[in-house]
Image (cartoon, rainbow, N blue to C red):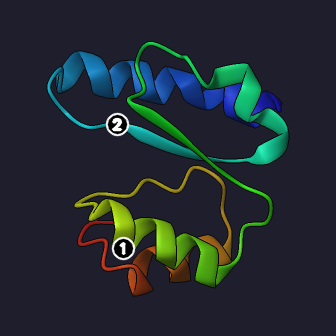
Amino acid sequence: IGDVILTLQVADALRKAYPDAQIDMLVQSRVWELINDYPSLNNVIQLDEVTVGNVRAVCRQGNYDLGIAVYPSFSLALGLWLGGVKYR
């Protein structure tokens, strides 16, 4: 939970630098309720389990240009790549 709260500062900085950007955050379901209405985020996407397939599906559906993985995870990194995220 602490990692997610600290990561909100990244969303704030991105919103300040790119006010018109679509900024979504992918989180585990257990913390979704805490940040669902955070003003710097357009959408908060919840996953019960972070797997390569789940991340890939979210990325393909969102058609994202950029993905920032603040939590180091091979599954997350591979899911971003397989999901077609151009910049990771």
Identify the amino acid type marked 1: Arg
Which mark is on residue 23? 2
How many numbered marks are there?
A: 2
Q: Quadrant of residue 52?
A: bottom right
- Give above or below for 15 relative to 77: above
Residue name at image x 53 percent, y 83 percent: 78
Number of other residues with Cα within 10 Å of mark 2, as a class: few under 14, some 14 to 19, many 20 or more? some
- Tell me: 19 left or right of 85: left
Mark 2 residue element: loop
Q: Nearer the viewer, residue 47 or 8?
A: 47
Which mark is on residue 60? 1
Identify the amino acid type marked 2: Ile
Q: Position of residue 41 (x, y in %)?
A: 42, 26
- Give above or below for 48 relative to 35: below
- Of the residues under marks 2 and 1, which one precedes in the sequence? 2
Q: Position of residue 56 (x, y in %)?
A: 49, 78
Q: Quadrant of residue 17?
A: top left
Residue name at image x 61 percent, y 25 percent: 36
